[in-house]
Amino acid sequence: MKRLAIAFILPALMLALSLGGCKGKIKPKDDTDSLVKIASGADNGYLIEVFSDDSLFVGYNKIYIRIKNKSTDEILNNFTVSLNPMMDMGTMQHSAPVENPPGANADNLYKGAVVFIMPSMAGTWTLSVHAEDSQGNVADIDLHPIIKLPAEVRMLSFESEIDSSKLFLSLCAPQSPEVGLNDFELAVHKKESMMSFPPVNGLTFSIEPEMPSMGHGSPNNVNPVGTGNGHYLGKVNFTMTGYWKVNMTIMQGQDTVKSNLAFDITL
């Protein structure tokens, strides 16, 4: 009887262990699961994949690049990556502000940014991605993204009141505003030529949020200060849900660059 019981028990235990082992196998998290895949392309034995936080729009877009060995699927992190956006309007071409990735991050993604300064309806955007490793291996792809206008403006263009230069002011954060204190990050670029849009440092900002429908503002806001590469970081306080205007004035020393600017933000 004991041998008979063991004969039944052992297979049951083995089955239970097998099932338990299957349940324990968790698919590894993909570092791009939370991103939107814009496009991909192959060149010289490499696969280049391009991602963003959302569909591309007029304004500041974070761009993430992943490079793989096409034959082995190995993710590579030893490349230098550069981005080159170009708008073809038929009779003329121009580029846009760019932040090239400094290198691969901990997730083996090359993180940069492009400020698309107009929608695709005015012409055709091409985003060229150039990748080169230390041995001189090169991979190049050209994408043709569709750039849309966001529901609320995320990039303002204007002439400086100091020297009439063309400036582009981008809202980088908050991307998903919430009630309470939010990071308020701006980026400023200058049109130096049709192909050059360098960052602008050395500015000072004052911000004043208001809720027009309720006739009030909010306390505890922090004016953005420069963090380098044309970026300015502060805090904006939204005390309730609804439609807000964040009014801004930009100064350079004692001179006004631009006043009466505002970003609309709806929670």
Image: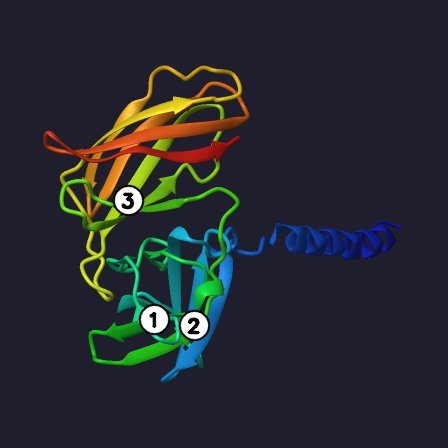
Q: Are marks 3 and 2 in contact (CB under 8 Å)?
A: no
Residue type pointed to by label 3:
Ala
Residue type pointed to by label 1:
Val
Question: As rendered, which of 261 and 79 lies closer to the eye?
Answer: 261
- Residue 162 place in picture, x, y as percent: 14, 41
Check residue 256 in the rendering and tell me which mark sits there, or answer none. Answer: none
Question: As rendered, which of 96 and 43 lies closer to the eye?
Answer: 96
Q: Which residue is mark 2?
A: 143
Check residue 187 in the rendering and tell me which mark sits there, or answer none. Answer: 3
Q: Earlier in the sequence, mark 1 or mark 3?
A: 1
Is residue 221 in view? yes
Q: Earlier in the sequence, mark 3 or mark 2?
A: 2
Question: As rendered, which of 165 and 46 lies closer to the eye?
Answer: 165
Instruction: Decide: is 101 above or below 144.
Output: above
Q: Earlier in the sequence, mark 1 or mark 2?
A: 1
Q: Are marks 1 and 2 in contact (CB under 8 Å)?
A: yes
Q: Which residue is mark 1?
A: 129
Farthest residue, direction right: 1
Residue at 87% from the left image edge and 54% from the top image edge = 4
- Residue 225 place in picture, x, y as percent: 21, 32
Colour setup of the view: rainbow
Residue at 10% from the left image edge and 29% from the top image edge = 254
Residue at 52% from the left image edge and 28% from the top image edge = 243
Instruction: Decide: is 96 above or below 228.
Output: below
